Amino acid sequence: MKLKTSLLLCALAFANLNAAYAQASNAKVLSASSSDNSCKFDVSFNTDPQVKEQTMNVSQGVELKLKQYIAVRTHRGANIASNVICQHLVGQQYTGSQEEWKGFINTAVQGMMQHGFKDLKFTKVGTDDAAYKGQYPNFEYTFTGDIGGNKQIIHNLAVLDKKNNQVITFSVSGNKKVESEIKSDYQQLINSFSL
């Protein structure tokens, strides 16, 4: 099994979240942890996040533990959704290869299109413009698109923590009319992240 296969589940969960909030408020610090060594990190949201957990058998002897945090606030009548997903792989190692990152992005694009996004544009964020300045391997990118007449902008970051064999994805999305607030919430979310 390759990383792109296991990341498919994360990308589809991400697409579901953005599709749901595209149609539809004080900082809250979260210390994410579980009984095993997965999903241990700190991040701060603008509102209290909802938390969802799921464990999936990916293949014989390989399990994917997902933990998702979703916080939504409203600004000028538009929802701004902050989404963090921790994806801990058990029984196989992430490698961080170019092929794995390419598979991750391809799967994210396919997931967005399957969930109704039209005119989807993908932009890789360059090093100089990146919000994340940390030490972990990462991939930062932006989507713009339309879902049901609602023009969306979605800022994204995927961070690979090889030591704990987990990928943590960050996403902040909302209607293009609140673009500066989306960017601000995204920068705040990324700045608050620590392992």
Image (tube, rainbow, N blue to C red):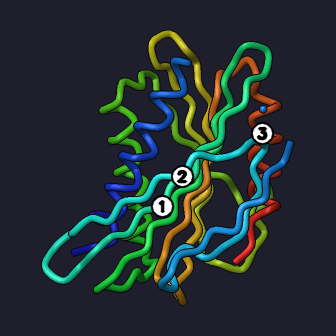
Q: How busy is the neighbourhood of tag 1: few (under 14 within 10 Å), some, or many (20 plus)?
A: many
Residue type, mark 2 in image: Val
Q: Earlier in the sequence, mark 3 or mark 2?
A: 2
In the shown orientation, is residue 147 left or right of residue 81?
A: left
Q: In the rendered image of this protein, does residue 36 appear above or below residue 10?
A: below
Of labels 1 and 2, the one closer to you = 2
Q: Which residue is mark 3?
A: 183
Dividing the picture into quarters, in which one does residue 59 lie? bottom left
Give the quarter of the figure containing the N terminus. Answer: bottom left
**C-alpha gap between disc 3 and disc 2:** 23 Å
Quick check: marks 1 and 2 in contact, CB under 8 Å? yes
Q: In front: 60, or 152?
A: 60
Residue displayed at 68% across by 31% down: 80
- Can the viewer see residue 141? no
Dividing the picture into quarters, in which one does residue 93 lie? bottom left
Residue displayed at 56% across by 79% down: 161
Quick check: marks 3 and 1 in contact, CB under 8 Å? no
Residue type, mark 3 in image: Lys
In the shown orientation, is residue 22 left or right of residue 81?
A: left
Q: Which residue is mark 2?
A: 51
Quick check: marks 3 and 2 in contact, CB under 8 Å? no
